Every structure is written in structure tokens, then in C-alpha cells.
Image (cartoon, rainbow, N blue to C red):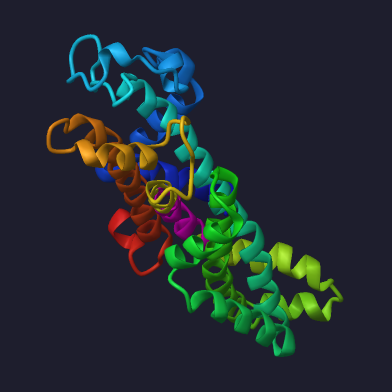
Amino acid sequence: MKKDEIIRVLKIMIRNKLSLLGIIIILILVVTAIFAPFLAPYPKQAEGQPNLEEKLQPPSSKHWFGTDYMGRDVLSRVIYGARISLLVAITVVGLGLLIGVPLGLLAGYKGGAVDAVIMRTTDIFLSFPPLLLALLISVTLGRGLVNAIIALAVSWWPWYTRLIRGMAVSIKEKPYVEVAKTMGVSNLKIIARHILPNAISPVIVQGTMDMGSAILEASALSFLGLGVQPPTADWGLMVSQGKDYLLNYWWYPTFPGLAIFITVIAFNLVGDTLREILDPRLRRRYL
């Protein structure tokens, strides 16, 4: 995407109320993650320090989101949990793109045996539901944040490979690509200068929407005990720890659950608007 097009897309997104709301929520998440030690009322409790004298206290002026079963301030831990969620989203989607996009470009441009090998391998991974595959990999590798990220990235890259492969197959038949070939331009330069820039838009849309999905699935792994481990503050882990207290101490699992819900919705709002802007069949409503 060219600079002028990027600016135009940003202006349209800012004018759209729903995408603007999503952008604001994402910016709040980023700022919260960066400045968590300064924003959290009780940083030590957010890092896991117990405070048993105030365990399971309801929301109050002292603890806006109440406290958990170890007396730790839930608001502080939700704020610190934003760091984990943002790290997971960026890393999982980044690794998925890093693996999937080059393979998809190679398969679509080269075709033949290369295409067959890459796409049959992709089909094997796609035959498993992503969360189920991530669960299997996490069980194999063991518990922990790093292993959870690896498991999610492994289950994510095939979607990008298939998406960009289809775009590459279509674009390589365009006249300007044929002209570049006749002029002796190398395959690598053709892919980098002509195929990738014209195929990247749907990948950007998918990657934006997948940020929220990555947070949701990482939270699911933590909920099942395969992701982030105590005492690290993580939204999925907090929901898991608080589920047994839901009836009598509703605030414990509710606030981290709301954080997951709002964050996923924000990324989906931005992704949906991006899809409509970058799709020639839908963009006219924004013109």
C-alpha cells in the first residue's frame, strides 16, 4: 500500500464511528500495556504479591475491581494482563505472517510441485481446528507462555499461506508481471515489487482481525492451565481462577472476562472496517 492510500484509509476509519471506537480501545490497550507499572494502583500485587488480609473484597474506592482469593487488587492485575495479551497478539500474528506469507507467495508464483507440496502441507494443518491443534502442541511442549505462543503460531500460519497463495496465482497472470519477466527481472524482485504489494491488503485485514482471536485463544489455553502460569497476571488465567467464585464473588472473573471481550470486539471492529474499505465491491459506501 502506498503512503497516500494508507493516509486515505486512516481518514476513512477515523470518520467511521465503530472503527474509531475500536481504534480508541486498542490505543488504550497499548498505552495501558506500556505504562502498566505507573497505572496500576498496586504494582506489587499485580506481579503476584499476596495480601491475604483483604482477600475477596468487593469493588470499593480502595479496590475499584475488588480483590482476588489472595487479596490482590483485580484492577492492577487486569492492567498488567494487558501486557501479556498484547504480546501474545503481536507475536502470534507476526510469526504466522512471517511463516505463512512467504510460503503462500512461493506456492502461488512457482506453481507445480512446489505449490503442491506447500499446499498439501497446509491442508494437513488446516484439517485440525486451530484451538485443538494449539492444545495438542501445548500439551506436547508443556505449559508456559512461550510454548503457548509457539502452539498458536503453528496453528495460524496455514490460513495466511492459503489466503496469499490465491492472490499470488491471480496476480502473476497480470500483464505487468509478464512484462517484468520478459525484461529479465528476477523472480525474487517480481514477488517483492509486484506480487506482494498487490496481494497484501486481505492479509492486513485478516491479521488485524486475528489479533483479537489470538488473545481469545491464548486466554483459552491459560484458562485450561496450558498457557501463562501463576503468579503472572493474565486475563484467561484470572477467569480460570475466579470461575469457582462467580456466584458469591462475581467481580473476580467478570472484569478480566470483560477485558477479553472488549479487546476482541475492538480488533474485530477495526478489521471489519478495513475489509470494507479495501474491498473494491464494498468501498463505495465510504467514498
Residue 50 appears in which quarter of the rendering? top left
The residue lying toward the viewer, choosing from 107 and 220, is 220
Quick one: which residue is furthest to the left in this view? 247
Q: Which residues are magenta?
A: 202-215
Q: Is residue 21 visible?
A: no
Residue drawn at x 56%, y 80% is 124
Task: Tell whether 181 sits left or right of 104.
Answer: right
The residue lying toward the viewer, choosing from 223 and 217, is 223
Quick one: which residue is furthest to the bottom in this view? 112
**Is residue 63 highlighted in magenta?**
no
Q: Is residue 158 visible?
A: yes
The residue lying toward the viewer, choosing from 57 and 115, is 57
Question: In the figure, 61 relative to 171: above or below?
Answer: above
**Is residue 208 highlighted in magenta?**
yes
Find residue 72 and report its horizontal and vertical position in percent: 34, 20
- Quadrant holding the C terminus: bottom left
By secondary structure, the bulk of the magenta-drawn segment is best described as helix
